[in-house]
Amino acid sequence: MPTSFVANGVGDECQKVGQIHPQTKTQTKTQTHHPHLHPPPNPPPLFRMHPPSPAPPPHLPPPLLLLSAPSRTALLTWFSSISSHRAMPWRKPFLPPASTPRALLARRAYEVWISEVMLQQTRVATVIAYWNRWMARWPTIEDLAAASEDEVVSLWQGLGYYSRARRLHEAARLVVTDEEMKGLLPREVGVLEARVPGVGRYTAGAIAAIVFGEAVAMVDGNVLRVLSRQLGLLADVKERGVVEALWEVAERLVKAAVADGEEEEEEGEAAGGSERPGIWGQALMELGSTVCTPKPKCVECPVTATCRAYQEGFAWVKGGKGLVDIEDLCTLCQPYGEAGDADADEEEDTAPDLTSQEAESHGKQPTTSAFFETNSAPNRAATTAALREIELEVIVDHARKFPWRKPKKQVREEEVVVCGIRRRSDGAYLVHQRPEKGLLAGMWELPSYTLPLENDRTIDARKEASRSYVRGGEVATVPWAFSHLKLTMHVHMFAYDDQGADQETNGPRTKWATIDELDEVSMGTGMRNCWELARGLGKAWMAYVPDSSYEAL
């Protein structure tokens, strides 16, 4: 099976193209420049239509999407037809900054900012409900700034990555009290990144493009996957050099998209901003989120005509005609047979392994399809119509290999003893606050203890070991998983008789809390599940469990 053109270095490593001699099967070196390594010296007329922009990285071919205005139009037309399908309440008509009242513009920037932060590592369907509740409670940035941190973290519960909520709260206070911003987020990407806590390159780009109409890129994981396939770039999109190269490509694309609509949006530009940068950025993200997913739906894609990964797969199912062998790999891309397992986690950007037969046939000598020998994009309708279902499956399977992914590390597993300790006198529960740094920083939890890690134990042995740390019966186990850690929480119940007790239990990070108080404090979702169990069993369990002091655990 062919590999994509693997742009893997920053020097001249990509300039040598090797061929296999048909009889001797030995390599002969040629010093030929690949036509896609650099922009052609005399660009085609379509390319010259756009204003000057920074040259692409020397180690990447120019994306065909940059050379095809019809394909860019096709993407925007597709997005216009489906943009309301998922009913995202933060997607609203563009407000020209120069003619929009400051308070209204500030609120719009706040809405987009909150949605973009919530959407990091979280599904759209989940975020919609949280965003609506958030806006109902804190409709303006001033309302958020006036809230307490505990209130903010409590409402955030269930979205994970709780540091995001704290940074939002911190940033809101700064923006509201800053003498220059006065409640309005800045429009410049550099200023947003430098002055607003928690705002990185992607979020800054989203705010600048969607709210203020700035012609800047907004590149998330979905866009990285789309561009990897458009370029046929078999590389790890988490590597810094690859990310920088794709950001630069994205910047050129958004400027080309804006140039496409300059005439029709002349009035909007004069009013101080264009809706086109925001729509273009959202279109790319929507494509990656719904169509160009880890397992792509190529038949639904509006830009297969410019997709190198798709066209490689198409060339392969049509017999591999025109394929040539290349001598050297550059240093950005990976050898074709070393991808991770695509089926390990369909929700992530995984890439599949070659079968043993494919590895034997093609792993030693990467190739590039004839698709790379031309600057023109094949006709999408003609290619798609000619495909049989089985051929389309082969193409999709090939596209899944982009971008390249490192094999996943095994997730660490831990056993945690969780103790629900209920005070007899008033029904309060003992809780502890986690350290201010680290996992679930500053969150409250029932007293817990992580068992020593012993990898050689079986699941049953670990469960039995958890019982040896407490005197009292286990009432339930609660599984919970983070991206890097899998927990099994063993919940035990205790009744504490405080009559005549002289122990001081309250401290800087430990306290007794009523049921109503615990329902309001910020807890991680896994611990919240443990608390729900403890709360439901508390009264009944007191009748059967002998009195115990928490100090005896």
Image (cartoon, rainbow, N blue to C red):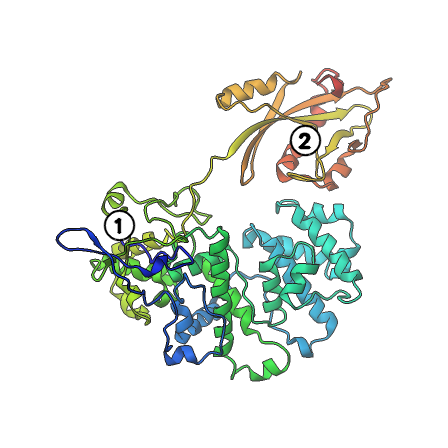
Helix, strand or loop at label 2? It is helix
Label 2 amino acid? Gly
The answer to whether residue 384 is seen in the rendering is no
For the residue pair 75 and 138, the one nearer the viewer reads as: 75
Apparent side of residue 502 relative to residue 332 in the rendered image (left or right) = right
User: Split into 4 quadrants, where in the image is the C terminus?
Assistant: top right
Q: Which mark is residue 536?
A: 2
Measured as percent of width and height from the top left, residue 354 is found at 31, 45
Q: Nearer the viewer, mark 2 or mark 1?
A: 1
Q: Which mark is residue 346?
A: none
525 shown above or below 308: above
For the residue pair 488 and 66, the one nearer the viewer reads as: 66
The answer to whether residue 197 is seen in the rendering is yes
Measured as percent of width and height from the top left, residue 145 is found at 77, 56
- Residue at 62% x, 55% y: name it: 117
Label 1 sits on residue: 365
Label 1 amino acid? Gln
